[in-house]
Image: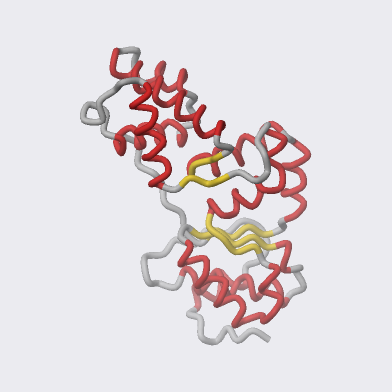
Amino acid sequence: MIDLTTLNPQQRLAVETTRGPLLVLAGAGSGKTRVLTYRVARLVEQGVPPWKILAITFTNKAAKEMAARIAALVGEQAQNVWVSTFHACCARILRRDIEKLGHKLQFAIYDENDRIALIKSVLKQLDLSDKEYPPRQVRAVISDAKNRLLSPAEWLKDAGDNFRNKQLCEVYARYEEGLRGNNALDFDDLLLKALELFASQPPVLDYYRNRFDYILVDEYHQRRTI
């Protein structure tokens, strides 16, 4: 039996409530991750197959800590619980089915340095000054557009059809061409392409709907728009 006596009454209530949706609001350091890990252990103890549980958090460090805590509570069965960040979860999903979107399975994932390097290359192609169009600012514009699900043309329509925005739109479009030409995705694409996959491929969406009975989200950060 999982020892729940170390939990306070509110934590224990959250852990023992295993049917229907549950929202826990708590401040930093108040035991959110503790509640989630005990809740996973409680579900496994009650007979829920570990592979039917998806536990999501925001950072790699938090995901490793969560996985370790779950392993301490349920042992080897913890290996079958999906514990990851949002981006890692989406990458895992895409590694299985991204070919359905016209990409190759063995895609590269561009980090910040890779993205900046590609933007600098695009600026050079277009003979645009990186002083007038600082690469990190351009990267922020592209990232914001992707997080709002806007293509280059849609972004231009939303941002306003002036000269600078037209140039940024062209940079964005060529940036996307560069990614596709290198069979690469950036971090924003991991979320965007997973959403696109679910929206355009109902059998894939049904597979994951049937795969997970419990989805537990430890923490998420809302991105600020520019």
Going by the image, does 24 lie left or right of 92?
A: left
In the rendered view, tell whether residue 21 sits above or below residue 38.
above
The C terminus, quarter of image = top left
The vertical placement of 87 against 117, above or below, is below
Instruction: Look at the image and name its color scheme.
Output: secondary structure
Would residue 171 be found to the left or right of residue 135 on screen? right
The residue located at (48%, 45%) in the rendering is: 110
| Above or below, 158 relative to 146 | above
Among the 4 quarters of the image, the one containing residue 42: bottom right
Q: Position of residue 138 (x, y in %)?
A: 33, 32
Instruction: Please give the name of the residue rendered at 68% of the width and 31% of the height, measured from the top-left corner.
Output: 102
Q: Is residue 91 left or right of residue 162?
A: right
> The N terminus lies in which quarter of the figure?
bottom right
Residue 141, located in which quarter of the rendered image? top left
Residues 111 and 29: in front is: 111
Q: Residue furthest left?
A: 131
Q: Position of residue 13 (x, y in %)?
A: 56, 72
Q: How far across and down, in percent of the image, does residue 198 sit?
A: 67, 38
Front residue of this view, candidates 98 and 64: 98
Circle count: 0
Residue at 28% from the left image edge and 18% from the top image edge: 164
> At 42% from the left edge and 44% from the top edge, which residue is drawn?
114
Q: Position of residue 30 (x, y in %)?
A: 40, 72
